[in-house]
Image: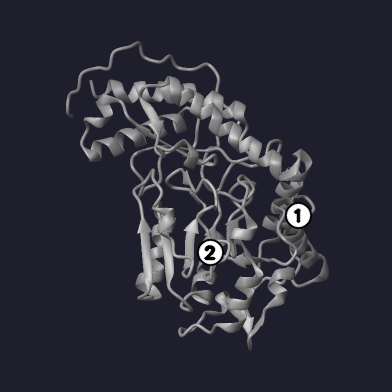
Amino acid sequence: MTIFAAVQGAAAQRPDFRPANPCFSSGPCAKRPGFTLSALSDAMLGRSHRAPAPKARLAEVIDRSRAILAMPDDWRLGIVPASDTGAVEMTLWSVLGNRPVDILAYESFGEGWANDIVQHLKLTDARVLDAPYGSLPDLGAVDPAHDIVFPWNGTTSGVRVPNADWIAPDRQGLAICDATSAAFAMALPWDKLDVVTWSWQKVLGGEAAHGMLALSPRAVRRLQTWTPPWPLPKLFRLTSNGKLAEGVFKGETINTPSMLCVEDALDGLRWAESIGGLPALIARSEANLAAVARWVKRTPWVDFLAADPASRSCTAICLKIVAPWFIGLPASDQAKAASRMAALLDQEKAGYDIGAYRDAPPGIRIWGGATVETTDVEALLPWLDWAHDEVRSGYR
């Protein structure tokens, strides 16, 4: 092991208090405060999702989601297979190819969409506007005549677009937004977007495998008038004979959903309504970011991965280790040191799943979505100081 000089200053003491809920994973995310399995006792288990009562529950997820998000009346919202990934892929394979496309890639999922568009759909008129982790691409370079594919919030980079001013109101292309870690925690400007996707297991803490697909009238027109030159699997088909599959947007899912997950999604939506809806959800997430920001300001060994405060995520809060002992390590040892910190917090039951995403720079990722209590974030932070000093001691 490489030997480094010890950083001056007393080591952090092992904290006396743990977060009441140590779940800080970025997906699946913490359940809403007070959640117990009894909240799912009315789940329509063993029922066909095609039957009237279960289908009504699916439609209720759609209706409550629309209301909380203040989605325009002329938008369609449906439940689709395979989480947010399924919703994005359905969109890419169904609407692209009509005109050139710009893809914003500033974290792993944006890079994935770029790879699918360039390598699998093989669109030759695709531009990838990329940026390293912690930064945004040049948003001014987006061409309003092109379709745009972008994540509103980089789940793996902790970077979000600060606003939609860069999206032209008179754009000719479609604005396709992967909003999985932004929906219910950030205000989405519906007039600047045409396709918005998310999944249940993010801000409201639902369970996995189900995605949400929202379409503007412009996106619906594209689906109705554009036939891609490639075959579409059944799970991707949103039209038939030039007509929209309206049932998808009324609770008639393409595949079989879990009615247990449906009940759980409804529980999260009802909780969101009970605390004040979208403004309250946004406030809770922003309070979590603010708590971390106060700690970062007074803590010399850590900083935000996102350098610009205006683009820092309030959900996927990504941090980098900037202590001299860490910066001096080889890259492989940096990854081991950061992983060791996360493992220590897991062992202490003080913070689960806080390691950086596998493709991101080594560091810490704290989920700050609305189901996370700010008091739990504040209780986690002294444990991070302790874990840092524990790992640092091995490199003296």
Q: Work out which residue is located at the far top of the displayed protein and give it.
A: 10
Rendering coords of residue 149 (x, y %)? 48, 63
Residue 133's mark?
Answer: none
Asked whether 307 or 325 is in front, the reply is 307
Binning the other alpha carbons within 10 Å of mark 1 as few (below 14), some (14 to 19) or many (20 upward) gives some
The image quadrant of residue 119 is: bottom left
Q: Earlier in the sequence, mark 1 or mark 2?
A: 1
Q: Is residue 325 left or right of residue 297?
A: left
Q: Is residue 176 left or right of residue 340?
A: right
Asked whether 227 or 7 is in front, the reply is 227
Residue 45 appears in the picture as rendered: no
Asked whether 88 or 153 is in front, the reply is 153
The image quadrant of residue 396 is: top left
Q: Which residue lies under the disc numbered 1?
A: 67
Q: Which residue lies under the disc numbered 2?
A: 176
Three-letter amino acid code at the position of disc 1? Ala
Binning the other alpha carbons within 10 Å of mark 2 as few (below 14), some (14 to 19) or many (20 upward) gives many
Question: Eyeballing the image, is 161 above or below 219?
Answer: above
Circles 1, 2 touching at the beta carbon (< 8 Å): no
Q: Residue at left 76%, top 40%?
A: 276
